[in-house]
Every structure is written in structure tokens, then in C-alpha cells.
Image (cartoon, rainbow, N blue to C red):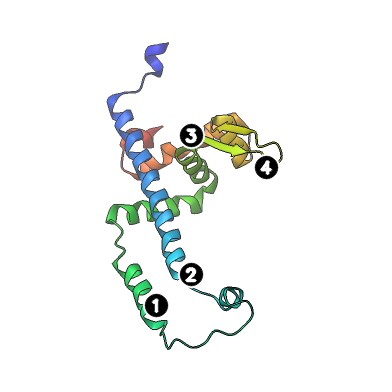
Amino acid sequence: MAEQNRRTAEQRRAREAAQREVDRFIAYLQGLDTIDQIAHQGRSIMGMWADFEGRPPSGSRFSEFCVLADKLEKIRLRNTPEEFARAYERLSAMSKKSPLFVEALVVDRFYRGRTKVAVDPFTEQRYEIHWNDAACAQLVGCTVKVFQRRVTKGYSQLECRLGFAEACAA
């Protein structure tokens, strides 16, 4: 019975490739977030109003244009490796057909096995939350069995998209 459930070397390679693909997808999404942060850096009217305590600042003749040019240069020079863009395209296309599977894969790779530390603001007691299947399933909004099934089917679909023939047969 145990022999029947063992993975072959090809199945392990397919799963590792699929996990790397999900990791690249997450990294690509985090890079997009970085671009958004770069674009929104800077001073706002309300921020300057608070900084100068409601009095208009005296002019320093400083041009904000050089700061804007620097931001645009950071965005332009941010080069994303090609395999990250391909991973984003592949998983985005997969999410159009089966968004629950992609969501489960991302939660599985991003959260599972990690520990989150939280402090209760009232008692200042420290809590550690270990991201296991139950915590991940709660985040996704399903039962543990359904979460595990989504992860398994999601990896099977992704392995098939990556060209592993054994995954397509299953």
C-alpha cells in the first residue's frame, strides 16, 4: 500500500517545478506592489499642511520634477526576469478557469509552515499563529479537506500547463 502512494522522481520534479512557478508568481505580484509604492511616494497637500501646522510654507524654489524623474527611472530600470512574467501569465490564465485552485496554491506557498506573531494590545500577551492547513483553510474560507483538494488539483493543473505529461493523464 505504501509503495502505491510513493511519488516517482518525475512526479517530484513536476511538483518542485510547479512550486517554483507559484513562488515566481508571488514574487511578480510583490514586485507590482513595489512599483505602486514607488509611484505613490512623495508629499501630499494634506501632509504638507500638517507638517507646516496649517501655515503655507515659504517657497524654497525647489522643483519636484527631479523627484518625479527619479521615481520614473526606478520604475523603468526595474527589470523583471522573463520567467517571472511567464509565471504570472500562466497562473493568471489558470485563474480565469479555476480561481479557487490558484488562490489555494498561493495561500499554500505563501503562508503554510510559517509562524505569525501577534500581540494582544490590551493584555500585551504574545500569540504565535502557526499557518497549518486549518489556518490556511480558514483564510480561504473552506474546510481543511476542501483546501487540501484544491491544492492537489491546482498543482496537477499547473504541472500539466508546465508540460509534465504524467500530470495531464491524472
Task: Evaluate if marks 1 and 4 touch, with contact meaning CB atoms under 8 Å apart.
Answer: no
Q: Quadrant of residue 144?
A: top right
In this rendering, position of residue 139 left or right of residue 170: right
How crowded is the residue under tag 3: few (<14 C-alpha within 10 Å), some, or many (20+)? few
Distance, label 3 to label 4, CA atoms, is: 22 Å
How crowded is the residue under tag 4: few (<14 C-alpha within 10 Å), some, or many (20+)? few
Q: Nearer the viewer, mark 1 or mark 3?
A: 1
138 w.r.t. 45: above or below: above
Distance, label 2 to label 1, CA atoms, is: 10 Å
Q: Position of residue 126 (x, y in %)?
A: 61, 33
Give the numbered dot on residue 68.
Answer: 1
Q: Measuring 33% from the left and 35% from the top, which residue is drawn there?
A: 16
Q: Position of residue 26 (x, y in %)?
A: 42, 49
Distance, label 2 to label 3, CA atoms, is: 30 Å
Q: Measuring 41% from the left and 12% from the top, which residue is drawn there?
A: 2
Residue at the disc numbered 3: 114
Distance, label 1 to label 4, CA atoms, is: 39 Å
Q: Nearer the viewer, mark 3 or mark 4?
A: 4
Give the numbered dot on residue 40.
Answer: 2
Q: Earlier in the sequence, mark 3 or mark 4?
A: 3
Task: Evaluate if marks 2 and 3 touch, with contact meaning CB atoms under 8 Å apart.
Answer: no
Residue at the disc numbered 4: 121
Q: Earlier in the sequence, mark 4 or mark 2?
A: 2
Task: Evaluate if marks 3 and 4 touch, with contact meaning CB atoms under 8 Å apart.
Answer: no
How crowded is the residue under tag 1: few (<14 C-alpha within 10 Å), some, or many (20+)? some
Task: Evaluate if marks 4 and 2 touch, with contact meaning CB atoms under 8 Å apart.
Answer: no
Task: Evaluate if marks 1 and 3 touch, with contact meaning CB atoms under 8 Å apart.
Answer: no
Q: Amino acid at mark 2?
A: His
In this rendering, position of residue 61 left or right of residue 162: right
In the rendered image, the residue lying farthest to the right is: 122
